[in-house]
Amino acid sequence: MAPAASQTAPEAPPSANTCALATWLVPGAGHFMLGDRRTALIGFLLIQGLYLAGVMLSDGMFLQVLPPEMRGRFAGALTPEAGNLGALLLQGRQVGFGDGVPRPFPDGLHLGMMLTSAAGILNLLLAARAHFDARARSGAVIEGAARHPGTCVLLGWLVPGSGHLMQGRVARGLVAFVLVVGLFALGTMLAEGTNLDRTRHFYYWAGQTFLGPIVFGAELANGHPMMTERPEYADAGVMLASIAGMLNVMLLLDVYGFSDAKLFGRPLFTEGSRGGAKEAAR
Amino acid sequence: MNDLGLHVGLFLLVIAVVVAVSCMFTEADDARALRLFPRRYATFVVVSAVVIVVMLVAEHTFASVS
């Protein structure tokens, strides 16, 4: 029997990609579209609050830290702040590289830049959470099979390896912590702390922020050293510290993929299973 | 060249971390990831050595000022 003409088709839920992209532009927008107003509000207030506090502390001058020859249209694209795209675009439009008149940096510049970069990374993690939550709407999720990937990834950023610990992968979590934090410590030692300064190494500093608050703590404790001569292994140290942050991104992807596969009841994507698939295909 | 040993040691240490994390990324099972490590590490070292030799030959051939 054909449906009555007065009946309207149920509204299709937003796709996971749409939710993630909306969150990228406006924190919490993806969850708002999913009807999860509580997460949307908390995410928006926390992330934009951090960003606003950072902008106020740094007078919005984080892009003015770049030397003139590096100031281009896409200079902000490789910064952690790009994770909070809407706010970054707004700041770029309002303040950007300044009005051309050099001004002294405020006292709160470094702390402010830590807050804005943390807001960007947290928004990326919220977007990943929104992507999972949108897919979970299908009802195919196995309740209790694993912790929420968004929570595990957030923990993995706050303390490297702790996302694995939360998933019950204790040995992997401990090894992950020792590897990436050890590499960061080695880099910092070689660079004699010069890596802990965004005004010195704008983009390398961005890489190491993916290691989480540990980096900010190290910077607050030992950052911005006054040097009379260049450390012999400064370049190597700066690079290693940045690589440590990027390696933590791989570990976060591992954490996300593990929870995601468990909750959707999919086999884990491993070399072993790929090898098995190849053998089966022969 | 005086620091050659230090440079090589640092390189071997750093790539150990990079290879270990890549093993963890590609293999969800801890035991399998551990078994992957030696082969990947050796491959990384050998390929890096080949690249170094090629660079040294190219430098010696085309960029030497002596």
Image (tube, rainbow, N blue to C red):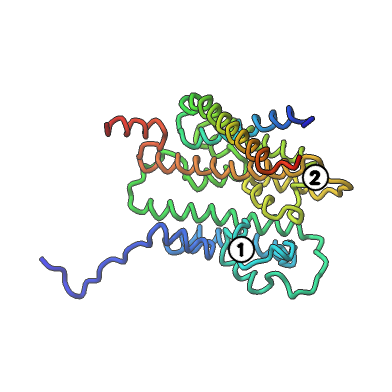
Label drawn at residue A48: 1
Mark 1 or mark 2, which is nearer the start of the sequence?
1
Front position in the image: B61 or A153: B61
Q: Verify CB contact (< 8 Å) between mark 2 and mark 1.
A: no
Q: Are marks 2 and 1 on the same chain?
A: yes
Q: Nearer the viewer, mark 2 or mark 1?
A: 2
Tell me the amino acid under the disc marked 1: Gln
Horizontal side of B59 relative to A32 (left or right) equals: right
Residue shown at 50% from the left, 57% from the top: A39
Of the 4 image quadrants, the one containing the N terminus of chain A is: bottom left
Res A31 seen here: no
Residue shown at 54% from the left, 55% from the top: A124
Tell me the amino acid under the disc marked 2: Asn
Give percent across and percent down for residue A137: 36, 54
Horizontal side of B1 relative to A271 (left or right) equals: right
- Residue placed under numbered mark 2 in the picture: A222
Of the 4 image quadrants, the one containing the C terminus of chain A is: top left
The chain holding disc 2 is A
Horizontal side of A81 relative to B31 (left or right) equals: right
Res A108 seen here: yes
